[in-house]
Structures are given as C-alpha cells and as structure tokens.
Image (cartoon, rainbow, N blue to C red):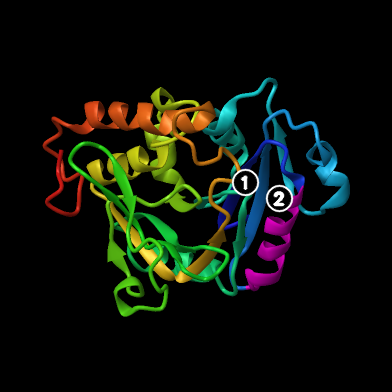
Amino acid sequence: MPLVSIIIPVFNQFDFTYVCLKSILNNSGDKIKYEIIIGDDCSFDLTKIIRKIVGNIKVVKTSENFKFLKNCNNATQRAKGKYILFLNNDTEVLDNWLFPLVDLMEQDETIGITGSKLVFPDGSLQEAGGIIWKDGSAWNYGRSSDAKLPEFNYVKEVDYISGASLMIRKTIWDKLGGFDEIFSPCYCEDSDICFSARNLGYKVKYQPASVVIHYEGKSNGTDTSTGLKQYQVINQKKLYKKWKNSQSNVAVTDRRY
C-alpha cells in the first residue's frame, strides 16, 4: 500500500509530463512508497498512450474535458495513499523532495497540508508559501528573490500552499469532499482548501527542504484577461465572498478578511 498518492492532472503537454515523471523516478529515493496517478483530461497528444511509454503509473481518463479542478477530484478517487500530493506536470522535482514533506506530516498530526519551495528554472525563488491579502488576492512570498536566503529556508505556517506541489492528508481531503467545485474550472482551489483545512483545526506549513522547479504559466499562460487564466481574477472574488465573514482561524497573519 502506498504512503503517498501523487496526482498529476494533465491535458496534452506530453513532453512536460514525461520530464516530470522522470524527475520523480530519479529524485524521490526509496524511503517513501508512492503511487503516481495521471489524471488525463481528454488529451489528444502522446499522453493518450502514456501507459505504453511509462511503466508503473495509473491513468484515470475523464469522459469529457473536465478542466483542472474536476480532473483532480476525479483522479483522486483512485488514490490509496495516506497522503495525497498534487503535482503540476510542468514541474521538475529535485533531489530528496518527497521525504521532507512526509516526514513533517508524520511528526505532527496537527499539520494538515504542507508544500514545497517552488523555484524558477534559473534557481531563483518563485514561492516560499503563499500570502492571502484582505481583498482575497494572493502573492507568492519571496518571489524572484535568492532562494538560499535564510528567511525562505525554515518550516513555517503560511496562508496557503500552491497546488503546483501540495500534500494533504487523505482523511481531510475526504472530509472536505475534495476541491470545492465553485472554483471550477481552476484557480483559488488550493487557497480555499488550505483555509478549509485550517478551519477544521489543522495547520498549513511550508517545507523548504522539498524543492520543485515550476515552469510557471506553461499550462494557462499569464494573461488574466483571457482563457482559463481569467478565472484567477473571477475566483479571487469567490474566495473573498466565501471567507470574508468567517470567525475561524483561517489566516496565519493579521491579513484577515
């Protein structure tokens, strides 16, 4: 039985997925037993036959194009691990990335969600945990800074963990019923589930010992006025509306709604 179920939602982009899978194989070590589940959202490139190219993976195909959030929820139904780890296919995991995430959770049952340090391909910092402001907007803490600076290299509580590399206890995932589909097709579902886990009394922590390269914007671009990227703005408003009146401990700083 795997301890961790790694969920990789994909729509085409076979080359990125292949590189991601190769990095998992090369850099996960043998301390943690894991399974890999590819959520194939009606791809029409080589992803269609990925099981013929890559061994020891599960592939869960959607019956129609579900888009990111519903694809994640669908694929996770096959997960058998104690922990569910969502990983974007436009990532490369670095050496010993998996054990620190699991070890942190195993040592403290009050931690419900943890996530990796995200870096750009040039090694600069993309995100050391996420910040949520009072208006529901978000920011990547430390963005474009030197990833080796001490302020980005200790375990700490954060407002949210990016879905590019986010691990959650399966018991919490099941209790919450997965990502809230009001945020479909994508964006803010990661922030929301972090707030929901905290609302249940769990902590959300950043683990800098787990490092992942994220090729940001390869899936949906960076223009928030068009395509799926526009839902980043739309769903920020939904996030604000959902949590603005909550009296629960939904933020770890004074940036409460």
Image height check: is 17 above or below 152? above
> Sequence order check: which comes first, mark 1 or mark 2?
1
Residue 159 percent across, percent down from the top left:
27, 51
Tell me which segment is drawn in magenta. 15-30
In the image, taking residue 234 as reference, residue 60 lies left or right, namely right
Residue 84 percent across, percent down from the top left:
51, 49
Given contact means CB atoms under 8 Å apart, are the residues at marks 1 and 2 in contact?
yes
Residue displayed at 58% across by 51% down: 5
Q: Which SS does the magenta portion mostly show?
A: helix
Q: Which residue was labeled with disc 1?
A: 8
Q: Nearer the viewer, residue 104 or 181?
A: 181
Q: Nearer the viewer, mark 1 or mark 2?
A: 2
For residue 17, the mark is 2
| Amino acid carrying mark 2 in the image | Thr
Badge 1 marks a residue whose secondary structure is: strand
Residue displayed at 41% across by 70% down: 208
Gap in angstroms between the C-alphas marked 1 and 2: 8 Å
Task: Farthest residue to the top: give it.
Answer: 64
Q: Is residue 131 magenta?
A: no
